[in-house]
Image (spheres, rainbow, N blue to C red):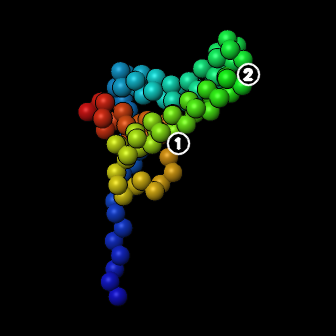
Amino acid sequence: MEEYIPDIIEPIPIIKKGKCKFVMYVIYLFISFFPTIAGFIIWYMYGFFIGVAFFLFLTLVMGIVISKMRLMSIPVSQREVSYSNLEVTKWFTDKNLCV
């Protein structure tokens, strides 16, 4: 019987630089809270149903954005692991923005 050797799992990167942390948190806050804030503003300006429609649309768009960030930054052997938005943002910032 052959011995199975699992792939090496990279830990989630730790962001240490101040600029990189700032960028990471700005991206995280944008992805997490922009659909809600935009939905409330549009609800106030145009009406409830249009606000809900824009909230749902922007939530879908942010899901696509986080999926693309995930594909660009997380190693292939770890893509099946479930990561939060903050963890994906840490990977993306470390691999693509703060090299």
13 in relation to 5, above or below: above
Residue drawn at (34%, 51%), measured in percent from left and top? Answer: 75
Q: Secondary structure at mark 1?
A: loop
Q: Quadrant of residue 7?
A: bottom left
Q: Position of residue 49 (x, y in %)?
A: 72, 25
Q: Look at label 1 and name its amino acid.
A: Ser
Answer with left or right where residue 17 lies relative to residue 35.
left
Is 71 positioned to the left or the right of 59 in the image?
left
Tell me if 62 is positioned left or right of 56 in this view: left
Q: Depth check: 28 or 16 in front?
A: 28
Q: Earlier in the sequence, mark 1 or mark 2?
A: 2
Q: Is residue 18 depicted above or below 15 in this figure?
A: above
Q: Nearer the viewer, residue 55 or 66?
A: 55
Element on which disc 2 rests: helix
Q: Residue at x 38, y 46 (%)?
A: 71
Instruction: Report which residue position mark 1 lands on.
Output: 84
- Identify the image quadrant of residue 54: top right
Q: Quadrant of the N terminus?
A: bottom left
Amino acid residing under circle 2: Phe
Name the residue rendered at 26%, 33% in the picture: 99
